[in-house]
Image (tube, helix red, strand yellow):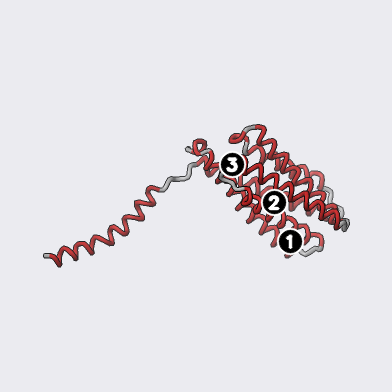
Amino acid sequence: MKKLWVIGLMLLLPLNMVASPISAAAQKPCISQSEVKFENEFRRLWVDHVMWTSNYITSATTAGAEDQKQVLARLLKNQEDIGNSIKPYYGEAAGNKLTELLKEHIIIAGDIVEAAKSGQGAKVNQLNKDWHRNADDIAAFLSRANLNLKNEDVKKLLYMHLELVTNDLSASLVKDWDARIVSIDEGVSHIIIMADAISDAIVKQFPDKFKS
């Protein structure tokens, strides 16, 4: 009798082991449509940021290019779009402030391109310091607005973005097209990581806005 009881227990154990993960999976909350929509749109805006920055580098470093003004205007519009994307959560003033910081980021980048083209190494170095100071300001702004974002973590993400844009510019200036392709691919992959980190933090901070 005792032997039958032991055999019965052994037969039940695998069933329990299989059922447990299923139950855990069933309890995992689903991602709402509003969360998916927001995170995808936020990601697209930051991918546009990288791609239009790269397009601007192409226009600015290509002799005879006639679209530099138009590409810069589109790139600056992208910074407005990113700022507008956070207004539903942080308000008009905060969205405008992020746009202002991002436009400064772009303007400094444009100055770096011009200085690098003309071989002004000292000016490039000074502008690079300004660029990183601006990145510090963006990181401070985002981390103050959302406690889920750590200042140092955001700063590291932004510094890597600057490094990858610099790689894109450097490859363009020496016409190393293979290296440029690598830098752009890496830039897009990295910016997706950064965009997702920010959007995930926003969703955590405002869960009631992403229920449906």
- What is the number of the mark on residue 13? none
Secondary structure under the numbered disc 2 in the rendered image: helix
User: Local crowd at mark 3 within 10 Å, few (<14), some, or many (≥20)?
Assistant: some
Find the distance from the CA under tag 1 to the CA under tag 3.
34 Å
Query: Looking at the picture, how far across and down is residue 17, in whole percent?
Result: 31, 59
Query: Looking at the picture, how far across and down is residue 100, in whole percent?
Result: 73, 39
Query: Looking at the picture, how far across and down is residue 16, in whole percent?
Result: 28, 57
On screen, 40 above or below 15?
above
Disc 2 marks a residue whose amino acid type is: Val
Asked if labels 2 and 3 touch by Cβ distance under 8 angstroms, the answer is no
Secondary structure under the numbered disc 1 in the rendered image: helix
Find the distance from the CA under tag 3 to the CA under tag 2.
24 Å
Q: What residue is at 59 percent from the left and 41 percent from the top? A: 146
Q: Earlier in the sequence, mark 3 or mark 2?
A: 2
Q: Which of marks 1 and 2 is nearer the N terminus?
A: 2
In the rendered image, which residue does mark 3 sit on? 146
Q: Earlier in the sequence, mark 1 or mark 3?
A: 3
Disc 1 marks a residue whose amino acid type is: Arg
On screen, 5 above or below 95?
below
Q: What residue is at 19 percent from the left and 62 percent from the top? A: 8
In the rendered image, which residue does mark 1 sit on? 180
In the rendered image, which residue does mark 2 sit on? 50
Residue most extreme to the top: 92
